[in-house]
Amino acid sequence: MANLYDAAYEMEKAIRGSAEYAQLLQSYKEVNSDPAAKNMFDNFRKIQMNLQQKQMMGQEITQAEVEQAQKSVALVQQNPKIAKLMEAEQRMSMIIAELNRIIMKPLEDLYGPPMQ
């Protein structure tokens, strides 16, 4: 079992050493060093987290909340620093999803592809 954990820690090191992570970290620092961008991004994240929490709890998301989230996304995307950060987050998310697909391959081979 330790071998799997060793591999996981090696994966963590590889992620932290990747160019994609370095770009994400740099973009995050740029947003946090700009008080206006940081405030805007923090508000965006707060809205995002509240919606995710409601969704996980099975609560209905109102049309007003959807509209508020859409306005928040449009607003933060107008800030070049935040837009750059969001692009870096998206790239990192895609890499992690691909890594997860690779990691889950043995179970998929055993049980078949997940049902949609």
Image (spheres, rainbow, N blue to C red):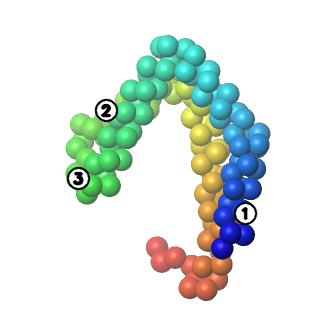
The quarter holding residue 30 reads top right
Nearer to the camera, 67 or 32: 32
Single out the mark in the foreground, 2 or 1. Answer: 1
Q: Of all residues shown, which one is farthest toward the top?
A: 35
Nearer to the camera, 113 or 110: 110
Q: Residues within 10 Å of mark 2 (few under 14, many from 20)?
A: some
Q: Earlier in the sequence, mark 2 or mark 1?
A: 1
Horizontally, is 38 left or right of 83 in the view? left
What amino acid is found at the position of numbered circle 1 in the picture? Ala
Horizontally, is 47 left or right of 82 in the view? left
Q: CA distance from mark 2 to mark 1?
A: 42 Å
Horizontally, is 76 left or right of 84 in the view? left
Q: Which residue is mark 1?
A: 7
Residue at the image point whose x is 36% and y is 47% from the top: 52
Q: CA distance from mark 1 to mark 3?
A: 38 Å
Q: Which residue is mark 2?
A: 68
Single out the mark in the foreground, 1 or 3. Answer: 1
Horizontal and vertical percent position of residue 8: 68, 60
The quarter holding residue 73 reads top left
Residue at the image point whose x is 60% and y is 79% from the top: 107
The kind of secondary structure element at disc 1 is: helix
What amino acid is found at the position of numbered circle 2 in the picture? Gln
Q: Earlier in the sequence, mark 3 or mark 2?
A: 3
The kind of secondary structure element at disc 2 is: helix
The kind of secondary structure element at disc 3 is: loop
In the image, residue 24 sits, relative to residue 39, either above or below, namely below
Q: CA distance from mark 3 to mark 2?
A: 17 Å
Residue at the image point whose x is 65% and y is 35% from the top: 24
Q: Which residue is mark 3?
A: 59
Tag 2 and tag 1, C-beta contact below 8 Å: no
Q: Residues within 10 Å of mark 1 (few under 14, many from 20)?
A: few
Residue at the image point whose x is 73% and y is 49% from the top: 13
